[in-house]
Amino acid sequence: MSSVLFQLLTQRTLAEIQDGLEIMADALRSIFILDPIPSNMRGFSPLSDRLAPDASNVAGVLAALQSSIKADVEAKLTRYVAELPEREIERVYAEKVGKFESDAMLYCEERFGTGSTKQTVDARGMSDGTLRFIAIITALLTRPANSLLVIEEVDNGLHPSRSSLLLSMLADEGQARAVDVLVTTHNPALLDAMGTALVPFITVAHRDPKDGTTRLTLLEDLGGLPKLLAWGLVGRISSQGLIEQALKAQSDAHSQ
């Protein structure tokens, strides 16, 4: 029930073996898998220097940042979240709360229409999509350089019209911070938003028809891809089942 790799780190081994173990362990430690659960993000959370996998302590992470870093992170949060379609958000931030200021709450300031009164809403009044988006941006902006961020169903709860916003944010901030990003999606709108430029970075997860094992196939390695793309963008051909048909045909051809 315990990783063999991390057990070996506590044992005395040859220097070259120990070096190899530490390289592997460091690589694994640099991977962070994020699966935000909005219902867990709505309460008060303790101050923390590390985001939880479900983002339940996102407010505590933001509030615990150093003042200069916190201001920069919250400014970027506000810039991206303000482009979501639900409301006019003017500020996203976290504050310490309670007598001992050991906990924090996530807030946003919003305004509906020109000249309307500004309202402050805490995490309990935010939509699931907004909370997930905040969690994703926070994770990306607080991960160390040369690490890997893995996001499950990255666009879950996000309006399809904001797929391009999500992709550009992940690409721009990931490149700026030297953080690799790996995401999963079933959304044709997000796949279409990738256009043709990102085709080399798309991998299809599918079942091998012969033995039922899971296979990962680069989309650009799929036979007849140019012909498929003549039918439309990746999201369209995926929703029509054309990718699955091509994978099956390719597997049948290899088995002959």
Image (cartoon, helix red, strand yellow):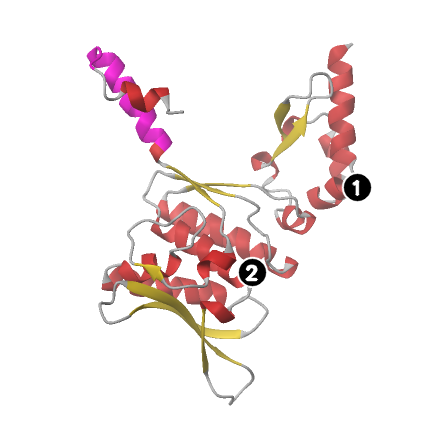
Say which residue appears at 36% left-offset and 50% top-offset: 51
Q: Is residue 219 visible?
A: no
Question: What is the span of residues highlighted in magenta in the rendered image?
Answer: 12-28
Nearest the camera: 100 or 220? 100
Q: Quadrant of residue 67?
A: bottom left
Q: Residue furthest bottom?
A: 115
Question: Mark 2 or 1, which is nearer the eye?
Answer: 2
Circle 2: residue type: Gly
Q: Residue furthest front?
A: 1
Q: Is residue 118 left or right of residue 211?
A: left
Numbered marks: total:
2
Nearest the camera: 12 or 136? 12
Nearest the camera: 2 or 80? 2
- Mark 1 surroundings within 10 Å by alpha-carbon count, few (fewer than 14), some (14 through 19), many (20 or more): few
Q: Is residue 168 left or right of residue 53?
A: right
Say which residue appears at 63% left-offset and 31% top-offset: 205
Q: Which residue is mark 2?
A: 129
Q: Is residue 84 left or right of residue 232?
A: left
Give the alpha-carbon distance from disc 2 to disc 1, as whole Å: 26 Å
Circle 1: residue type: Gln
Q: Quadrant of the N terminus?
A: top left
For residue 246, above or below residue 143: above
Q: Quadrant of residue 2?
A: top left
Say which residue appears at 30% left-offset and 65% top-offset: 71
Q: Position of residue 133 (x, y in %)?
A: 50, 58
For residue 116, above or below residue 34: below
Q: Are marks 2 and 1 in contact (CB under 8 Å)?
A: no
Label 2 sits on a secondary structure element that is helix
Q: Is residue 14 magenta?
A: yes
